[in-house]
Image (spheres, rainbow, N blue to C red):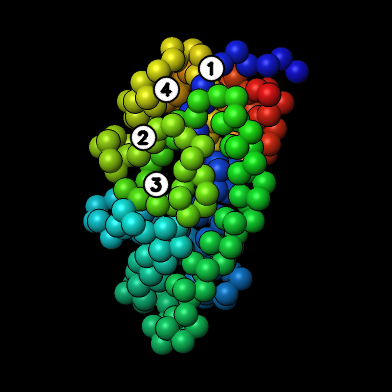
Amino acid sequence: MTKLKIKGIVFDYGGTIDTNSRHWAEVIWDKYEDVGVKVNKSEFREAYVHGERTLARFPHVKPEHNFKDVLYIKLKIQIDYLIEKGLLDKVEAIENKYSERIAEYCYSYVLDVLSRTKPVVKSLSEKYKLVLVSNFYGNIEAVLKDFGLIDYFSDIVESAVVGVRKPDPAIYQLGVEAMGFPAEEVLVIGDSFSKDVIPANHVGCKVAWLKGEGWGDEIIDEKIPDVIITDLPQILEYTI
């Protein structure tokens, strides 16, 4: 196995560290089914997109909120939307505590995944400088502290703070600048082909694509990433 010649690593967060390649929409949809929310996947998708757009426009998430808080806020927006559109019965949603239960289940899911991914981040931090680049809501530091990840990263570039969002390559350029190494000596690890692989490659970084369960019809060119993995621990084979 040929080792990558790098000095630093830029990590994506959502879908990479917290779910190990699963798109968050798929994780949440599984929990909708588990608790018996009576909507179809198309209706859920509509509510999910509405929720993400709402959180991008309005500051519902505060800097002190941890990920359980984010999940509850996100789920409440989704469930309220489904009720408003007449796709879900309000009494049923309240009695079954859909927002609270799905948020709890999703938070537990992340804790399970972190038992596999967190040791990888720790191992890499002992050899390389790590920077986090994430589309998030202005509270990524609170999330990282809650999960015991904050000390592994020398710097954080968060979309809500810097005013640039993926897939704009500029956010990865900020990550490279925070790293302090030439782009060609920096490895980016991310799960989204369009939001991580393409923009990171554009700024000249090496790229490890954590290929998994996406959510959409991305145009994929597997010749672009330097490494393709399907499980985050596999990156250790190319780095340590």
x then y, percent, for residue 149:
51, 44
Q: Disc 2 marks which residue?
A: 157
Q: CA distance from mark 3 to mark 4?
A: 18 Å
Question: Dot 1 lies on which element?
Answer: loop
Q: Which mark is residue 141?
A: 3
Relative to 157, does residue 174 appear above or below in the rendering? Answer: above
Q: Is residue 42 depicted above or below 6 in this figure?
A: below
Tell me which label, 2 or 4, sits earlier in the chain. 2
Q: Which residue is mark 4?
A: 179
Numbered disc in front, either 2 or 1: 1
Residue 11 visible in the shown view? yes
Q: Residue at x 51, y 14 (%)?
A: 185
Dot 1 or dot 3: first in sequence order is 1
- The mark nearer the N terminus, 1 or 4, is 1
Amino acid, disc 3: Glu
Q: Position of residue 95 (x, y in %)?
A: 46, 87
Q: Would you identify the image quadrant in which residue 60 lies?
A: bottom left
Looking at the image, is mark 3 or mark 2 earlier in the sequence? 3
Label 2, secondary structure: give it: strand
Marks 2/4: CA–CA distance: 11 Å
Amino acid type for the residue under numbered disc 2: Val
Seen at 70% across and 32% down, the residue is 234
For image coordinates 46% across by 48% down, the residue present is 144
Judging from the image, what secondary structure is the residue with disc 4 in? helix
Is residue 192 depicted above or below 115 in this figure?
Answer: above
Alpha carbons under labels 1 and 4: distance apart: 9 Å
